[in-house]
Amino acid sequence: MTRSAQPGRAARAARGTLVLLAVACGDVATSDTRGYTKATLEDPGLTIRAERSTAMDALGDPILPLAAELQPEAN
């Protein structure tokens, strides 16, 4: 074997390694055809309790002034 054949062999080995790594990073094959699925609701895991009502909650939402829409002046 000549020295000029070695770089080509190393390049092929490197490409093969890259292909194997790319294939290994893919998702596991599945037969599920439902598309996007949400987490199961039977055991949701983390749940958060609602906050206690405060005096500010009893006041309701503020009355906000309506903003008048201004038309641009014609020159």
Image (cartoon, rainbow, N blue to C red):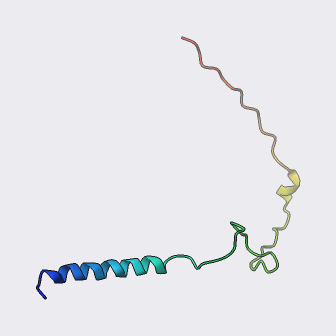
Residue furthest bottom as drawn:
1
Residue furthest top as drawn:
75
Residue 27 location in percent, x, y? 56, 76
Q: Is residue 74 left or right of residue 31?
A: left
65 or 16, which lies in front?
16
Q: Is residue 68 left or right of residue 4?
A: right
Quadrant of the image containing the N terminus: bottom left
Eyeballing the image, is 22 above or below 75? below
Residue furthest right as drawn:
58
71 or 56, which lies in front?
71
Q: Is residue 26 left or right of residue 62?
A: left
Residue 26 location in percent, x, y? 52, 76
64 or 11, which lies in front?
11
Residue at x-position 69% and y-position 66%? 35
Eyeballing the image, is 53 above or below 32? above
Quadrant of the image containing the C terminus: top right
Residue at x-position 86% and y-position 63%? 53
Residue 38 location in percent, x, y? 73, 70
Quarter of image, res 49: bottom right
Residue 64 location in percent, x, y? 78, 39
Residue at x-position 85% and y-position 59%? 55
Q: How many marks?
A: 0
Residue at x-position 84% and y-position 56%? 57
Eyeballing the image, is 63 above or below 20? above
57 or 69, which lies in front?
69
Quarter of image, res 37: bottom right
